[in-house]
Amino acid sequence: KIEAPLIKMTKAEIIKAGVALGLDYSLTWSCYKGEDKPCGQCDSCKLRLAAFEAAGLTDPVEYA
């Protein structure tokens, strides 16, 4: 049995669920560049920033 509880959720819904569970999003990022700080420009960073905006929240990560 495969379970994928997030599969039907939007990225904004996932962000909100993480916040409700107490997830510290300042400790996470998925930048494609792999540097010390996320770039804020690659597709992954742009999707994350858009998800936080759609959720009505500010991304706590410091971008390069």
Image (cartoon, rainbow, N blue to C red):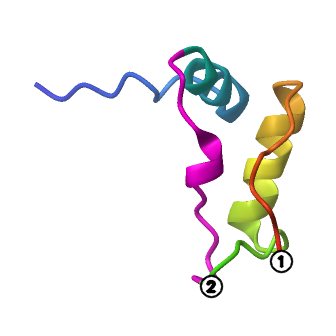
Q: Position of residue 51 (x, y in %)?
A: 77, 38
Q: Which of the two residues, 14 or 62, is positioned nearer the viewer here? A: 62
Give the mark nearer the N terminus: 2 vs 1: 2
Position of residue 25 relative to residue 19, above or below, is below
Which residue is found at the position 75% from the left and 52% from the top?
47
C-alpha gap between disc 2 and disc 1? 9 Å
Q: Quadrant of the N terminus?
A: top left
Q: Which of the two residues, 6 or 15, is positioned nearer the viewer here? A: 15
Q: Which of the two residues, 35 or 4, is positioned nearer the viewer here? A: 35
Badge 2 marks a residue whose secondary structure is loop
Residue 17, picture quadrant = top right
Q: Disc 1 marks which amino acid?
A: Ala
Total count of labels:
2
Q: Which of the two residues, 52 or 8, is positioned nearer the viewer here? A: 52
Q: Which residues are magenta?
A: 21-34
Q: Position of residue 20 (x, y in %)?
A: 59, 14
Q: Position of residue 45 (x, y in %)?
A: 74, 62
Taking the image as shown, residue 41 lies to the left or right of residue 32, namely right
Q: Which residue is mark 1?
A: 64
Taking the image as shown, residue 10 lies to the left or right of residue 45, namely left
- Contact, CB < 8 Å: mark 2 with mark 1? yes
Residue 12 included in the magenta stretch of the image: no
Marking on residue 16: none
Marking on residue 35: 2
Mark 2 is surrounded, within 10 Å at the Cα level, by few (under 14), some (14 to 19) or many (20 or more) other residues, namely few
Mark 1 is surrounded, within 10 Å at the Cα level, by few (under 14), some (14 to 19) or many (20 or more) other residues, namely few
